Image (cartoon, rainbow, N blue to C red):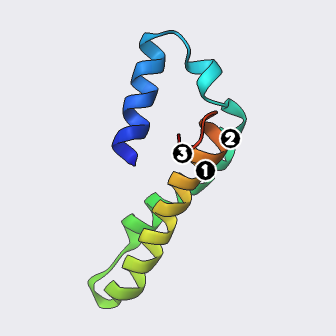
Amino acid sequence: VIKRICIEAESSIKDQSFLSKFRMSGLPQLSNKLEKFLGLLKNASDDNIVTDRTQVINSLQDVVEVITQDIMAEGHG
């Protein structure tokens, strides 16, 4: 999914259609989700690996969801 998002972004930049295929209004929400995700990665510890792993996975899923539902105009397409 992430690779497909990257391909779509790169393709739309080359085609000069990025602003019509991606909604910039979702960027603040994406920024918040990425900040949470990176914070979880930074603070992950071996002592609590199961909980940390679950939180990291859920946070990454939130990031992908914001990109596909709020930023990409064609969503999961």
Compared with residue 37, is residue 5 higher up or lower down, i.e. above or below? Answer: above
Quick check: can you spot residue 31? Answer: no
Could you tell me which residue is drawn at 37 percent across and 77 percent down?
Answer: 53
Query: Which class describes the residues within 10 Å of circle 3: few (<14), some (14-19), or many (20+)?
Result: few
Dot 2 falls on a residue whose secondary structure is: helix
In the depicted view, which residue is nearer to us: 43 or 22? 22
Above or below, comparing residue 70 to residue 10 in the picture: below
Amino acid residing under circle 1:
Val
Q: Residue furthest bottom?
A: 47
Residue located at (36% from left, 75% from top) = 44
Tell me, yes or no, whether the two marked residues, 3 and 1, touch with CB atoms within 8 Å. no
Which disc number belongs to residue 76?
Answer: 3
Whole-percent x and y of residue 31?
59, 46
Mark closer to the chain start, 3 or 2: 2
Residue 3: x and y, percent? Answer: 34, 41
Asked if disc 2 and disc 1 are in contact, CB closer than 8 Å, the reply is yes
Residue drawn at 53 percent across, 54 percent down: 63
Measured as percent of width and height from the top left, residue 49 is found at 32, 84
How crowded pointer 2 is (Cα within 10 Å; few <14, some 14-19, many 20+) is rated as: some
Residue at 60% over, 35% down: 74
Q: Where does label 1 land, which residue?
A: 66
